[in-house]
Image: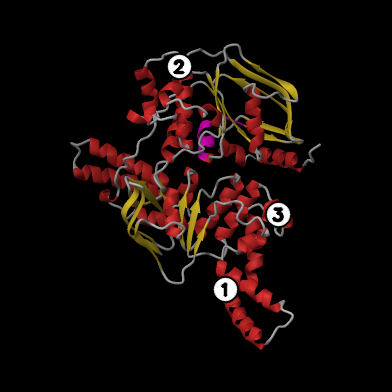
Amino acid sequence: MITTENLTVRFGKEALFENVNIKFAPGNCYGLIGANGAGKSTFLKVLSGDLEPTSGSVHIKKGQRIAVLKQNHFEFDDYTAIDTVIMGHKHLYDVMKEKDALYMKPDFNDEDGIRVAHLETEFAEMDGWQAEPNASSLLNDLGIPQELHYSLMKDLSGSEKVRVLLAQALFGTPDILLLDEPTNHLDLATITWLEDFLIDFPNTVIVVSHDRKFLDRICTHIADIDFRNIQLYTGNYSFWTQASALIMKQKEERNKKLEEKAEEFRKFIARFSANASKAKQATSRKNMLEKLTLEDIKPSTRKYPSINFKFSKIPGKDVLTVTGLKKEVNGERLIKALSFDVRQGEKIAFISQNQLAVTTLFEILEGKIEPDEGSVNWGVTATHSYCPKDNNDFFKTDKNLIQWLAQYSEEQHVSFLRGYLGRMLFSGEDAEKAVNVLSGGEKVRCMFAKTMIEEANVLLFDEPTNHLDLEAITSLNNALIDYTGTVLFTSQDYQFINTVATRIIEITPNGYLNYQMNYKDYLKNPDVRKKREQLMSMSVK
């Protein structure tokens, strides 16, 4: 268990939290949510002891161990992957190293023998003899092959380091587990494994994530950071959002009787409870939901950006033809013999184990780089707008938001531009902020404003949910579902792909897969699995 007492965190005069009193109980998984800049990562740092609060305190039962998903990918460069994982249980690792050092002493004496005996007892009590096998098992489960377990961290790729650090946090069943965006850089199979691991995890989990499906599957509670306070709610993310919307709707219907409101809420609870899966986490959540009352849920005060994509030029049926594309970057083959046609209104998700392949494809489609072989032919009526993953080049200027957006608009009236910025939650003085000081999420919302103004009939999005809070992701998700033009996109968000895409194209170094179906069906399709395995097993020539 971990609790806070009158916790306050200030940066200058600005308060992130004020007098927060909250308790996180064992056996529960808490999804920590809030708008960009609300202080989610800061709160985790305070809980872990990495950051001192301005006032107030954090209380943890004596002897309990906290594990944190490390964000510094270079911290353990001089250690092997297996040692890095075991270091997640610091005391166990220290005992193991001290014991090994004593056994290596050439002048081992009686005093050393007494110390070793004590260490051996401690080591056994912590199940130390299983440390390496358990660490190795975690690495295997997270996609790190056996041959890399004793490699130095500095010799691993960025994605491999992320997985090792995740294994470090999970190692040894900590009493309190703090995870900040644990699904970043993980493929779907690994995310599913992590979900199952956390569902069965017996102790306290507090997790920050922008992955809605992940939060829905693992969370028993939502901890919402809103207006410098943190409120706890029973249920997963979908339950919280829908319950909050229901309560807000009921408040607006002022004439509805209290008993009618309560009955509507009870029916809502019953629907969610009935849909709980057989997993332990979900069953626990089901029991909690059945005890909720109308007064337990408060509507969220956070705002959703208003995203609505339209096109001004009527598109033809034939949008794009790609023939025989091949591309290598720094001697690595990314794309081989890629061919496809795009028709008006299609929404195609491009996926790959190497996201650079998709980014490279989008840069070729936009004419930013040339393919080694093949051709790209856009339809004569096609107009396209591109939101790249790396948008920094768009913001290397000291223009304010109004001036910046004016570059992409035929209409130059300030009120018109302010209208688009307001829809992206830039109101009042915010619209006069210099674009070169914007956060990652603010830059992405600016790019959406640009895209809306351009009114293109083809949209290209490279990881558009990066840096966004859950409200913005939901708004973008709904906007692309409603958009009647053509969408070519890539994302790591399962729910986003599954609800938007009507077609999946998967790129590998040895070829590609092209199927007209949603993402869920694509992943389950036995023909897809067979062909993917064939492509993955081929050597790159």
Tell me the chief SS of the magenta region.
helix
- Quickly name the residue at label 3: 145
- What residue type is disc 1 on? Met
Which of discs 2 and 1 lies nearer the camera? The answer is 2
- What residue type is disc 3 on? Pro
Question: The N terminus lies in which quarter of the figure?
Answer: bottom left
Q: Residues within 10 Å of mark 3 (few under 14, many from 20)?
A: few
Q: Which is more toward the observer, 385 or 313?
A: 385
Q: Are marks 3 and 1 in contact (CB under 8 Å)?
A: no
Residue at the (56%, 33%) spot, across then down: 389
- Quickly name the residue at label 1: 126
Q: CA distance from mark 3 to mark 1?
A: 26 Å
Q: Residues within 10 Å of mark 1 (few under 14, many from 20)?
A: some
Q: Secondary structure at mark 2?
A: loop
Marks 2 and 1, the one that precedes in the sequence: 1
Residue 292 horizontal/vertical position (percent): 31, 53
Q: Secondary structure at mark 3?
A: loop
- Quickly name the residue at label 2: 409
Residue at the (46%, 72%) spot, across then down: 63
Q: Which is more toward the observer, 251 or 211?
A: 211
Q: Residues within 10 Å of mark 2 (few under 14, many from 20)?
A: some
The image quadrant of residue 521 is: top right
165 w.r.t. 91: above or below: above
Q: Tag on residue 472?
A: none
**Left or right placement of residue 18 versus residue 523 in this view:** left
Marks 3 and 2, the one that precedes in the sequence: 3
Q: Are marks 3 and 2 in contact (CB under 8 Å)?
A: no
Q: Secondary structure at mark 1?
A: loop
- Residue 275 visible within the image: no
450 w.r.t. 244: above or below: above
Q: CA distance from mark 2 to mark 1?
A: 64 Å
Marks 3 and 1, the one that precedes in the sequence: 1
